[in-house]
Amino acid sequence: MLIFECATDGGATFTACTSPVTRTGLGAGSYSLRVRARWQGGEADATPAEAAWTVDLTAPDTTITGGPSGDTNQQTATFTFSSNEAGATFECKIDAAAFALCASPHVVAVTLGAHTFSVRAKDGAGNLDATPATRTYRGVAAGTPTRVRLVAANITSGNQQSYDPGHGGRILAGLKPDIVMIQEFNYFPTNGTAEIRAWVTSIFGPEFSFYREVGAQIPNGIISRFPILDAGTWQDAAASNREFVWARIDVPGPIDLWAVSVHLLTASASTRNSEAIELRNYINMFVPSTDYLVLGGDFNTDTRSEACISTFGSILSTAAPYPVDQNNNGGTSANRSKPYDWVLLDPDLKAKQTAVVIGASSYPSGLVMDTRVYTPLSEVSPALFGDSAASNMQHMAVVVDTLLGP
């Protein structure tokens, strides 16, 4: 009589078994089954048959690596994406449609209005990414100006004035800026270029570029969806741990935009005015009057009538109305009593300013972003209610929208 004996997972001991063999309750890992035939009371097969397999319970991650975000006047959009698991397949959808099998690159027709592209990976074991990657964009008619969102952000909450706890990053991700004038541009534990690059990609997307001053304790920087054509620093003679950072950016349309990231000192109003005079001189020397100019950042101003604002007023629009939150409060300090943070436009860019539109909400003069008062927070996901109240968070982000091009 012929019988069968089985051994599992590399074990040396064979025990009697019958076909089929069922194994249950297996966790993630590698498994094997060896089986040999034996004549009852006789010799066994010296070359057992073997089956090996892996139980994979980990869902893959999905990353969108290319495609439009913000406004697009093209008739089609091409999205590229990838997974951290080799051999994964993908499912895509637009808005509320059902997911369907797709591959990268994936081309979709662009219709007018706001849309969300979603993609999720599925691995060879059938695990499906439960958190699809998404990219929002807005189809506009050909010839329509492009909405360009400008944000000033000194919204660190981590040790050594850094973004690594996540509060400021979530706020920035929720605001979906096109150009950020960022202060205290640190991310630990290494705070190196590769780690900063990874942070920018995780918050804004791989298509964003950045410039960050080198060697500063609390560096200023520029982050941009649009190509940075040139960038550098101008010395802030009053500050020992940062400089003025500038970037010339190829925004939509024929005119370049110069973005300047500023972090003035807390020392005194007169010191801040000295810094403003120095910066104004740099701008007059290097920025063509025919280009757009935005100056954004942490001015540390106690009032809107400080001398430094008057100094900037000789080259930039500094008059009211100013960005406010949903309670009509324009203060950007932690307790919301002082106008620390600014986004200032030169007159030709000011003429292009438009209301900030987020979801169904509109802010005619710009937005001061405080998660404690913003509603509904779903409009600025993944920002959380307590992010603006995080320990060490001393500022609110300021948002201004413009329409540029074609």
Image: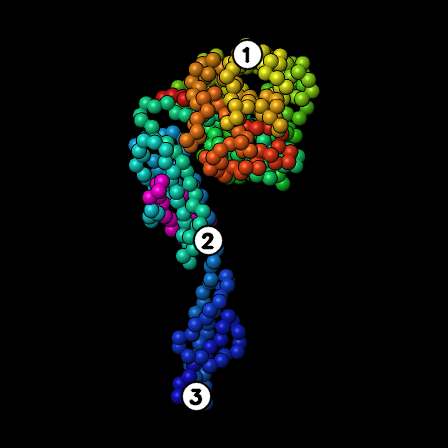
Sequence-first tag of 3 and 2:
3
Q: Amino acid at mark 1?
A: Gly
Mark 3, residue position: 40
Any part of residue 88 in sight: no
Q: Residue at horizontal 32%, vertical 38%? A: 108
SS class, disc 2 = loop
> Coloring scheme of the render?
rainbow
Q: Position of residue 92 (x, y in %)?
A: 36, 45
Q: Which mark is residue 357?
A: none
Q: Nearer the viewer, mark 3 or mark 1?
A: 1
Q: Tell me which corner region of the image, top left, top right, bottom left or bottom right, holds residue 71.
A: top left
Q: Position of residue 17 (x, y in %)?
A: 44, 79
Q: Residue at horizontal 40%, vertical 57%? A: 126
Sequence-first tag of 3 and 1:
3
Cβ–Cβ below 8 Å for labels 3 and 1? no
Q: Is residue 171 above or below residue 355?
A: below
Any part of residue 54 in sight: yes
Q: Nearer the viewer, mark 3 or mark 2?
A: 2
What is the distance, in whole Å, between disc 3 and disc 2 at their CAs?
46 Å
Q: Amino acid at mark 2?
A: Ala
Rate crowding at label 1 as few (under 14), some (14 to 19) or many (20 or more) other CA atoms within 10 Å. Answer: some
Cβ–Cβ below 8 Å for labels 1 and 2? no
Mark 1, residue position: 313
- Start and end of the magenta stretch? 81-97
Mark 2, residue position: 59
137 and 194: which is toward the camera? 137
Q: Is residue 93 magenta?
A: yes
Q: Position of residue 255 (x, y in %)?
A: 42, 18
